[in-house]
Image: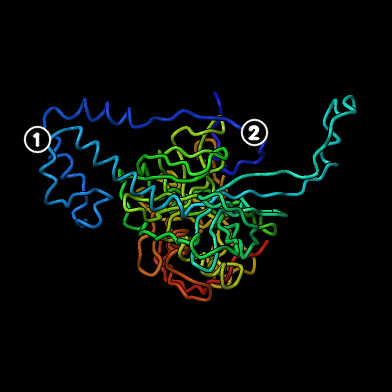
Amino acid sequence: MKKHLIIVISLVLISVFALSACGGMADIASIVSNQLESAQAASEALTQAVPPALDAESVGGLSKPKSELSSITSGSELLAAYENALMNVYEMVGPQVVNIMVQTDTNPGDLQNIPGLEDMPDLQIPEFNQGLGSGFIWDTNGNIVTNNHVVDGATEIMVTFSDGTSVLASVVGTDPYSDLAVIKVDASADLLNPVTLGDSNQLKVGEIAIAIGNPFGLDGTMTVGNVSALGRSLPSSRVDLNSGATYSIPLVIQTDASVNPGNSGGVLVNDLGEVIGVTFAIESATGSSAGIGFAIPAQIVEKVVPSLITNGKYEHPYLGISGNDMTPDIAEAMNLPVDTRGALVQQVSPGGPAEKAGLQPSTTMVTINGVDGTVGGDVITAIDGQPIKNMSDIIAYLAIQTQVDQTVKLTVLRDGETQIVDVTLGSRPTQ
């Protein structure tokens, strides 16, 4: 069985080029034809599909206000309205997305140990790699947002706008923890058309999701799907070298809109053309789209990016623990009710905020379902009165609701008794 991997989706080598077929409007037409059995059904389906808050100026690019949707009397008109909405979104957002080409140094010495290389004396070993990614215009000052992994280690960055204009860019700030970065260009004002951020906190599974980027270097590519899941937690590229702890990006949006290598740093937008996320990874056994793509949510982008522009970095609130979700088996091993929910503190980072506040790590070794582990530490059940069901809830709360030096109140179960522990958050380690 092939192993599925979470893959960041910048295109590493320019020489790697492939095309991937994906469903188009013919598929949509077939679905509409099969599902709409009458003109009345078509009208009702469209009326229900349009969010009630939209009006004549903002119905996802539709040319008619919701009050007039009942005049659409055929499946073909329904399809035409849907197509028109997508075309309007692309016309608006397409020029806001850019192609990013990066040049990075390599160490030719690392290639000398490849078996058989000594038998190919005419082989020319490149001294640099080129890669591709995407980005989008943040403001009229020339700041452009992309993924950290797109520009990490870059010695030269070239930005190409939708009209073909190419300019050099410099790095303004990077954040490996959220996989976001800001680069800056000196370009004419008519090219600097900033995006509009949407509210990713209001997203619902099933809403339309539109990805625009440069998969495989094919600039200005738009693919359409849905928000297929919310609240995913994916590992970031940063590891604490002192403790070995890994960190996660919370509240990640999952979509079935096709994203591929080269889409990294591009946008995921809603039917109003508002950016709801930044595409950055896929889950795939082949390295190409398998219908599961991931985007960093807008609510994290709007917290991190302004700090990258102002300070060149973003300081993430830091609690200094690692742990596990509570399960019935863990609860039973700790003599707690089997329906106990929360996050079990298994390790406390030396010198970190949690240790200073007196949080207790797990120390009792147990074997649960054949797996060795520790139990007996504090179980965090709430932060500032907000219930905590698992570790992802803690990560999400810290990322969105807190800042460095803020004091939070943790509700913990310790030896079966509820306690309140005040913790003053620090800043995540830089290494």
Q: Is residue 314 left or right of residue 230?
A: right
Give the percent coordinates (x, y) of residue 109: 86, 42
Label at residue 70: none
The chosen color scheme is: rainbow
Examine the rendering and report whether any part of residue 148 can be seen.
yes
Q: Please, what secondary structure does the residue beneath circle 2 have?
A: loop
Q: Is residue 266 left or right of residue 257?
A: right
Q: From mark 2 to mark 1, how far is it between C-alphas?
A: 49 Å
Q: Amino acid at mark 1?
A: Gln
**Which image quarter is the N terminus in?**
top right
Pick the residue in front: 3 or 306.
306
Give the percent coordinates (x, y) of residue 345: 51, 58
Q: Please, what secondary structure does the residue beneath circle 1 have?
A: helix
Pick the residue in front: 58 or 361.
58
Pick the residue in front: 59 or 244.
59
Pick the residue in front: 47 or 431.
47
> Crowding at label 2, few (<14), some or many (≥20) Cα neighbours within 10 Å?
few
Q: Earlier in the sequence, mark 2 or mark 1?
A: 2
Examine the rendering and report whether any part of residue 380 can be seen.
no
Give above or below for 421 relative to 150: below
Q: Amino acid at mark 2?
A: Val
Q: Residue at image x 50%, y 72%?
A: 423
Give the percent coordinates (x, y) of residue 76: 20, 32
Give the percent coordinates (x, y) of residue 343: 45, 55
Label at residue 16: 2
**Which image quarter is the C terminus in?**
bottom right
Q: Is residue 111 left or right of residue 261?
A: right
Count of all numbered marks drawn on residues in the image: 2
The residue that disc 1 covers is 40
